[in-house]
Amino acid sequence: MSYSFTGISAQTKSLQKSPLLSEASPESVGISPERLARIDRMCEEEVANGNLPGIVSLVARNGKIVLWKAYGMAENQTGRKMERDAIFRIASQSKAITATAVMMLWEEGKFRLDDPISKYIPEFKNQQVLKSFQYSDTTWTGEPVKSEITIRHLLTHTSGIGYGIIDSDERFKMIYQKAGVTDLFTTEKITIAESVKKLAKLPLHFSPGEKYSYSEGLDVLGYFIEVVSGMPFDKFLQTHIFDPLGMNDTRFYFPDDRAARLVAVQHKVDEQWKKYPVTFYDTDYPVKGAKSFFSGGAGLSSTVKDYATFLQMYLNEGEYNGVRILSRTTVQSIMGNQTGALFGGPERFYGLAFGVLSPEGQDKGGQGSAGTFDWGGYFNTSYFAAPKENVIGLIFKQTQGPVNDETGWKFRQLVFQTIDD
C-alpha cells in the first residue's frame, strides 16, 4: 500500500527506513528460547487453571517478533477460540495514541504546549476549583483557578479535571453525571465536542499543575485535535497514524466484517466465564450503537500486532517503515519527566504520553531497564517497551470484576529475563 505524502494521508517520508515488524527466531535477536518458553508455559497455565478466559501475548526485540501466541477462548459461552489477530478494547491505551496525534500537530507549529486550552476551546475560560458540594441536590460552589489549564496539563493529568464515573471522589461522579458528560465509551449518539463543552463548565479537583490526578484530559485533547486540524478526530488518527503505520485493525468502531474478531469482555460467575452484562456502558460499543463518540482517553480497540507496531515506531525514535511520524527530538521530550515528583515517586515519572521507569525503578527489579515506558487499559490489557533493550511486550486480556490474574507482573518480569546477549 502506498501513501501520498503531499496531503493528509501520512506525516512525511523519512531518510530512515526501518523494516516492518516480522517474526524471527529468538536467537537471532539475543533472546533465549528456553527462557522465552517460560512465558508460554505461564500463559498456558493461567488459562488452564481458570484464572483467565483467554490471552494474546507478543514479545519483540530489535524489530523482530519472537513470541506471538493466543491462548484459551475469545468467548467461552459460544466456544469461540482466541486467535492471534483478535481485536481487544484497549481503553486507556488510547491515551498514548491521542497524545502522539497532539504532538504531531505541535511539530507543525500549530500551538505551544503551555498555551491555555481556552485559546482553542473558549468554554474553558474562567474555570473554578470545587469549594463546597451539597449531596442533597448536587449543587456546588467554586473558587477561581490560580492558573489556566494548558495543553501540557491535559497531556500529563495535572489539569485538575476529574474522571466522572470512575473518579475516586464521589462528588465528581455526581457532578459529571448530572451534567451529562460522557466519560469513557458509549453507544449513544453524542460527539466529543458536545461532551467536552459540558465538561468545561464543571469544577476542577485542584488548580492546574498542583497535583497529578488521572483524568479525562485526553478526551478534551481529542476535541482539541479536531479544532486545530479541522478534521474529525477519528479521521485524523486514521490518516496520520493508523494508515501510515499499517495499523488496519485499530479503530474506534468496526464494521460487521471485523466484529467477529472482537473478544468478549467476560467475568466469572459460579466459576464459569460469562459475557459481561450492560452496566453504565455496553461492552459491545465498538460494533453497535451510534458510533459517533470518539473518546481520546478510552475509546479505541486494537490488536497486539497493531499496538506493537505503534510502540516500535517509538523505539525507532519516531520512524517506521520509512514514515516519519515524530522527530526523535520530539520523542525525547515525550519520554522526559514532565511531572516531577507528582507521579510515581522516585521509581516512575510521567512524560507526555506514557509512564516511564526511572533508574531507581530499574534497580528495584522486575520492571525492566530505565526508560521503559508503559500503560494499560480498563479491560485488562497492558504493554511496555524498553528503548535500552529494544524490547516490546504486550499481554492482552478482556475481563471485568474480580479476577485472579497475576499475568501482568509475571509477564513483564519474564520478558526481561529472556535477554541473552
Image (cartoon, grey):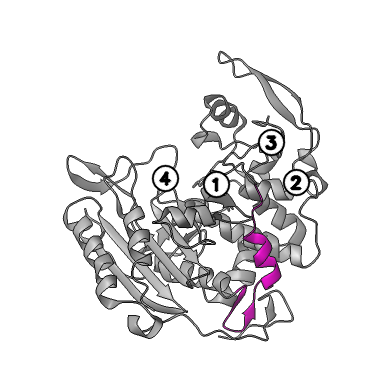
Give the residue number, with chain letter if any, for mark 4: 282
Taking depth in this image into account, of 143 and 5 the one nearest to the observer is 143
| The image quarter in which residue 176 lies | top right
Give the residue number, with chain letter if any, for mark 2: 150
Taking depth in this image into account, of 179 and 57 the one nearest to the observer is 57
In screen coordinates, is 407 left or right of 362?
left
Residue drawn at point x = 62 percent, y = 48 percent: 219
Q: Amino acid at mark 2?
A: Thr
Give the residue number, with chain letter if any, for mark 1: 346
> Residue 182: horizontal and vertical position, in percent?
57, 40
* Mark 1, secondary structure of its residue: helix
Task: Nearest to the eye among marks 2 and 4: give it.
Answer: 2
The image's mark for residue 210 is: 3
Residue drawn at point x = 67 percent, y = 37 percent: 198
Task: Nearest to the eye among marks 4 and 1: give it.
Answer: 1
Q: Amino acid at mark 4?
A: Asp
